[in-house]
Amino acid sequence: MPKTLYERLGGAKGIARLVDDAVDAHLRNPIVKTRFENAKDIEHAKRMSLEFFCAGSGGPEPYTGKDMLTIHKGMNISEQEFLAVVDDILAAMDKNKLGENEKKDVLAILYSLKSEIIRV
């Protein structure tokens, strides 16, 4: 039986490292830096991202956060900002030595959410 994306990402511990590295990259990225610096509670955002990635990749952890449209409504996120975040996530995946298949699967998930994030 093939492994789930959750297992291929290293389970909750691997995904936690990925989320930490991605958020650290966002805080250094001039395109999205201010959005993350001005977040009310970056630790909460990390926790929700961890839950979201775990649940969305086939893990047993439930996602207890709001849906993507509700979270991003009114933020007026641009295509450029969306792509910057995606690039940061892919770079974090490289840093964590995740494979091309994992990157393709994560990219597919991210792009499936695009209409709930950009300009809503």
Image: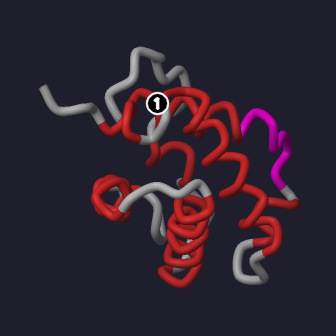
Element marked by disc 1: helix
Quadrant for the N terminus in the image:
top left
Residue 102 screen position, x and y as percent: 35, 54
Q: Local crowd at mark 1 within 10 Å, few (<14), some, or many (≥20)?
A: many
Residue 11 screen position, x and y as percent: 48, 28
Work out whether 18 lies above or below 61.
below
In screen coordinates, is 50 left or right of 102?
right
* Residue identified by numbered label 1: 54
Residue 103 screen position, x and y as percent: 38, 61
Q: Nearer the viewer, residue 105 or 111?
A: 105
User: In the rendered structure, which segment of residues is drawn in magenta?
Assistant: 39-45
Note whether residue 76 is visible: no
Q: Residue at x 70, y 40 (%)?
A: 46
In screen coordinates, is 119 left or right of 28?
left
Q: How is the image coloured?
A: secondary structure
**Image quadrant assignment for residue 45:** top right
